Image (tube, rainbow, N blue to C red):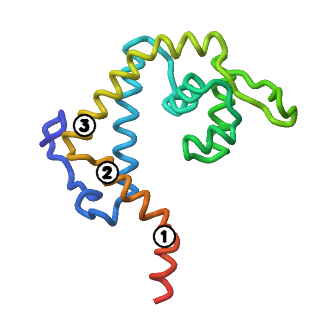
């Protein structure tokens, strides 16, 4: 395999390291997948940030939710959801209102523009889901391996594993 200028590709350092470069490989794969998804949105002439998907989809499926509820459902940090909320509000796709049951809490909901965007993107999201399922099957159920990796990290974090090795 060679790049377009005919020069041979350098050695794939991260691939050669195997599990020792797990984080680097996951970042590289994430960048490739996110980049292709971004190109798909652009092909539809839609400005869309990948980080919006989970929040928009949850709001579309479940109605208004707090930042904490979104973070728990998506299993990401409160800070990450707060940053996405701010970005969605700036884009006019979501709005924050007081919770009718507890005025101290704020709920995020889709604006009419957000609802329209979700409706427009639903076919693309279905196509992305189908392509992801195809990739997962071709890669022989990589999501099952990712489930096992998440479970292993939940049992004992990478941080704890590093500390254990430094103590010996």
Residues at circles 1 and 3 in contact by the CB criterion of under 8 Å:
no
- Residue name at image x 62 percent, y 38 percent: 70
Name the side, left or right, on which 118 lies relative to 125: right
**Element under label 3?**
helix
The picture quadrant where one finds residue 36 is: top left
**Quick one: SS at disc 1?**
loop
Where in the figure is residue 69, as x and y percent of width and height?
Answer: 66, 39
Label 2 Cα crowd, 10 Å radius (few <14 / some 14-19 / many 20+): few
Specify few, some or many for label 3: CA neighbours under 10 Å numbering under 14, 14-19, or 20 or more.
some
Which circle's residue, 2 or 1, is located before the other in the chain? 2
Rendered location of residue 27, percent (x, y): 40, 48
**Residue 167 percent across, percent down from the top left:** 50, 87
Q: Nearer the viewer, mark 3 or mark 2?
A: 2
Q: Earlier in the sequence, mark 3 or mark 2?
A: 3
145 lies left or right of 153: left
Label 2, label 1: how many angstroms apart (C-alpha)?
Answer: 19 Å
Q: Residue furthest toward the right?
A: 103
Q: Which mark is residue 144?
A: 2
- Disc 1 marks which residue? 156
- Quick one: SS at disc 2? helix
Q: Determine the CA span between mark 1 and mark 3.
A: 29 Å
Image quadrant holding the N terminus, namely top left
Quadrant, the C terminus: bottom left
Residue at (64% x, 28% y) in the render: 87
**Residue at left offset 45%, top offset 16%:** 121
Left or right of 141 in this view: 129 = right
According to the picture, the residue beneath numbered tag 3 turns out to be: 135
Residue 113 x, y percent position in the rendering:
62, 11
């Amino acid at each position: 395999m060679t790049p377009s200028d005919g020069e041979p590709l350098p050695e794939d350092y991260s691939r050669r390291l195997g599990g020792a470069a797990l984080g680097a490989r996951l970042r590289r794969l994430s960048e490739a997948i996110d980049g292709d998804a971004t190109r798909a949105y652009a092909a539809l002439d839609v400005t869309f940030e990948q980080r919006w998907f989970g929040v928009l989809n949850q709001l579309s499926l479940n109605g208004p939710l707090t930042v904490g509820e979104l973070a728990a459902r998506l299993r990401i940090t409160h800070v990450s959801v707060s940053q996405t909320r701010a970005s969605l509000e700036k884009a006019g796709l979501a709005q924050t209102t007081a919770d009718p049951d507890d005025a101290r809490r704020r709920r995020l909901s889709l604006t009419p523009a957000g609802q329209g965007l979700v409706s427009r993107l639903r076919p693309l999201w279905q196509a992305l889901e189908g392509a992801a399922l195809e990739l997962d099957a071709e890669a022989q159920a990589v999501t099952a391996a990712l489930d096992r990796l998440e479970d292993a990290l939940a049992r004992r974090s990478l941080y704890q594993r590093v500390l254990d090795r430094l103590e010996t």
